Each structure stands twice: as structure tokens, then as C-alpha cells.
């Protein structure tokens, strides 16, 4: 296992790229804050798992992908869908259960799905989607395309047998897939002991015949560098990679969980916020003279306008008609 925790010196020629990474993380942060507020007001029903604090993982990883590549995620997936290009309107409407949602109001928070961007969920059962990633990777190889699959999951999923079975199969069959474990330190949340906060995925997993990398999941550029290498291995050599991105969620496990939960202190949370991924990239750009305060304010204002537009759209959108109970999301 190799470890990547520090990014390279910023390249002035990449200024627009860095700004876009910052914009995407801000979009996810503001979107999730507003989604949380709407949930508290009873406008969003069901379960809702916010991605606040983990933005660097989805943004850094998905920025490495091509249009033909496939993404599969677990239930904390709002950020992944937004980073992949699903509109804020479409995601917010889905949270509201409205017809204009990416799953036409049938999936809700945990089951976002957007075939137009090759974003295949949004899966509510822990670890259940990991074998699907091997399936889409196998399909790409069988069809002789150069498409890569990236699969996101939390650290609690490595307790599931399908995780081990899938990684062994991916290694044996040399499938073009990148497995990204978003280790946010507390698994399912309320039932975890403090020891889980320092849990190393590789200490609990078998040794697989694939590349394994550890990365600081609070550093978007570090994540981007590591996943770039992994995607290249998959695309060029058909080889899988397991990446552990050590990150931290600021919110509880879900909206049903207290913000701090019963398993961590407010002091710990505030300490982790000092490593905030958005502030980290913003500071790097300011220090490198690639962003000033006015530029940051402009980006944030545009993001806030986009999210407000999404909220307005979701509130005004129509509910799915009763007959949609008997139709497929993608039926005409």
C-alpha cells in the first residue's frame, strides 16, 4: 500500500481547473446545507444522509473520469451525483419526491440514478452495490471499450462478504474498476466504538492482487492525483485498484442522528473542521495568487444562486401521478 497525503505545487496553467474543483465542492456544501434545512422543515421525507465534510473525495475522484465511465455509490451520494453533472434541480427535486427528479421522484435521497451521466446509484443496503461495480467493469471489457467503473462505499462495507468476494474477482479477472473506500471514521454511526475512528481498512481486509493506496480524503488535489493513477491503470491495463480515502463527515450519520452523535465530542468535530477541504483549497489558491477574495465571493454567489434555483424548482415541481407507480423510471 502506498500513501499520498500531500499535493504538488499548484500550476498556474491549471487555474480554471482548480476553480472548478472549488466550485463543485462549494456546490455540494451549500446544496447539502439547504437539503438539511428542507428536511428539518418536513419538505423532504424518508432518510437523508448528508455529505458535508467529504466533498473532496467525490469531486477529486470524479474529475478524473471520461464521459463513458460509470459511477456507482452508496446512499450518501448527493455529492457524487452533483460532481458527475446531474443538475442541482434534478437532485433536489428527487429529494422532494417530485416528477422532475433524476429518478422521477421514485428513489429519493438514497436512490439517485442518472443514466445520462452513467451514474448508477445510490444504493441503500450497505455493500450491496460493490458487486455491481465488478459487473459494469466486466461489461466494459466484454464489449471491448475503454470505460472504467469507479465504486464509492463507506468503511463499514468492508465487513460485508460481497466486498471481499468482489475484490478477489476483480483482481482475478483483471477488471477495469477503482474501489474507493470513503473512511469517514464512524461506520454506521451510533453503534460504533471509538476504536473505529482509527480503523484501517487494510488491517481488516484480505491481501488482494491489486494496487492499494491510502490518501488524505480532505485534500481534493491529493485525491485527484491518486485516482488519476488508478483510472489510468484500469483504462490502459485493465487492472483494479483499492483506495482508502480518509475523510470526515461533519454531520451525524443521517438526519435522524444528532449532529455530534453520541460517539464523538464537539471538540473533535471542531478540530476536524480545521482541515476543511473547501477552505484548504481556497487557501492554497490564495497563497499561489490564483484566487482573491472577490473571486471566491463570485464563485460562492453563483453557487448559492444555483442552489436557490434548485429549491424553487423542487418546491414548484409536480408530484408524480398515481399511474407512475406502474411504470419504469426510464419508460416513455
Image: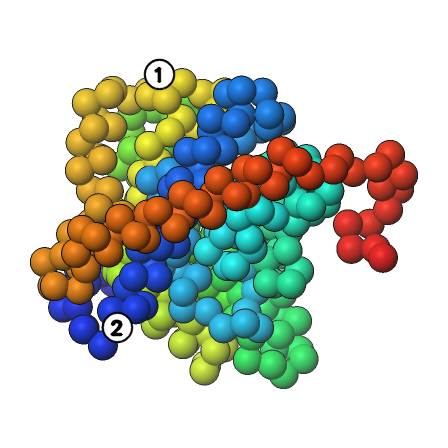
Q: Residue at x 39, y 50 (%)?
A: 302
**For this view, does 321 lie left or right of residue 278?**
right
The answer to whether 50 is drawn above or below residue 8 in the figure is above
Residue 277 placement (x, y as % from top left): 26, 47
Residue 262 placement (x, y as % from top left): 35, 16
Image mark count? 2
Instruction: Tell me, for residue 262, which label it has, or none.
Output: 1
Q: Which of 23/79 is in front?
A: 23
Q: Are marks 2 and 1 in contact (CB under 8 Å)?
A: no
Residue 221 is at least partly visible in this image: yes
The answer to whether 145 is drawn above or below residue 122 in the figure is below
Secondary structure found at label 1: loop
Q: Residue at x 49, y 33 (%)?
A: 35
Instruction: Find the distance from the CA under tag 2 to the CA under tag 1.
Output: 43 Å
Residue 251 placement (x, y as % from top left): 37, 29
Residue 69 placement (x, y as % from top left): 55, 69
Secondary structure found at label 2: helix
Quadrant holding the C terminus: bottom right
Q: Quadrant of residue 155?
A: top left
Q: Residue at x 33, y 59 (%)?
A: 21
Q: Quadrant of residue 23?
A: bottom left
**For this view, does 323 lie left or right of residue 296?**
right
Q: Earlier in the sequence, mark 2 or mark 1?
A: 2
Residue 225 is at least partly visible in this image: no
Q: Circle 2 sits on which residue?
A: 14
Instruction: Tell me, for residue 288, which label it has, or none.
Output: none
Quadrant holding the N terminus: bottom left
Q: Nearer the viewer, mark 2 or mark 1?
A: 2
Amino acid at each position: 500500500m502506498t500513501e499520498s497525503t500531500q499535493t504538488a505545487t499548484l500550476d498556474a496553467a491549471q487555474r480554471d481547473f482548480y476553480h472548478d474543483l472549488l466550485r463543485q465542492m462549494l456546490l455540494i456544501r451549500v446544496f447539502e446545507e439547504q437539503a438539511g434545512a428542507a428536511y428539518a422543515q418536513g419538505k423532504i421525507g424518508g432518510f437523508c444522509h448528508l455529505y458535508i465534510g467529504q466533498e473532496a473525495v467525490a469531486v477529486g475522484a470524479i474529475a478524473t473520469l471520461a464521459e463513458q465511465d460509470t459511477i456507482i455509490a452508496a446512499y450518501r451520494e448527493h455529492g457524487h451525483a452533483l460532481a458527475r453533472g446531474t443538475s442541482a434541480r434534478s437532485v433536489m427535486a428527487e429529494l422532494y419526491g417530485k416528477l422532475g427528479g433524476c429518478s422521477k421522484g421514485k428513489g429519493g435521497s438514497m436512490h439517485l440514478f442518472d443514466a445520462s451521466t452513467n451514474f448508477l446509484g445510490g444504493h441503500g443496503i450497505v455493500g450491496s452495490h460493490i458487486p455491481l461495480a465488478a459487473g459494469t467493469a466486466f461489461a466494459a471489457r466484454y464489449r471491448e471499450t475503454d470505460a472504467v467503473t469507479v465504486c464509492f462505499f463507506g468503511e463499514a462495507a468492508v465487513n460485508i462478504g460481497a466486498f471481499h468476494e468482489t475484490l478477489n474477482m476483480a483482481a482475478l479477472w483483471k477488471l477495469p474498476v477503482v474501489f474507493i473506500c470513503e473512511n469517514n471514521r464512524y461506520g454506521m454511526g451510533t453503534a460504533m466504538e471509538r476504536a473505529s475512528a482509527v480503523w484501517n481498512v487494510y488491517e481488516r481486509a484480505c491481501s488482494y492482487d491489486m494496487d492499494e493506496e491510502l490518501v488524505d480524503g480532505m485534500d481534493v488535489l491529493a485525491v485527484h492525483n491518486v485516482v488519476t493513477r488508478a483510472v489510468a491503470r484500469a483504462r490502459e491495463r485493465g487492472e483494479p485498484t483499492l483506495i482508502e480515502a480518509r475523510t470526515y463527515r461533519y454531520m451525524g450519520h443521517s438526519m435522524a442522528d444528532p449532529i455530534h452523535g453520541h460517539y464523538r465530542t464537539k471538540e473533535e468535530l471542531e478540530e476536524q473542521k480545521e482541515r476543511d477541504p473547501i477552505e484548504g483549497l481556497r487557501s492554497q489558491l490564495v497563497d499561489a495568487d490564483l484566487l482573491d477574495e472577490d473571486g471566491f465571493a463570485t464563485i460562492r454567489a453563483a453557487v448559492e444562486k444555483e442552489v436557490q434555483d434548485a429549491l424553487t424548482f423542487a418546491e414548484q415541481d409536480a408530484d408524480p401521478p398515481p399511474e407512475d407507480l406502474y411504470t419504469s423510471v426510464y419508460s416513455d
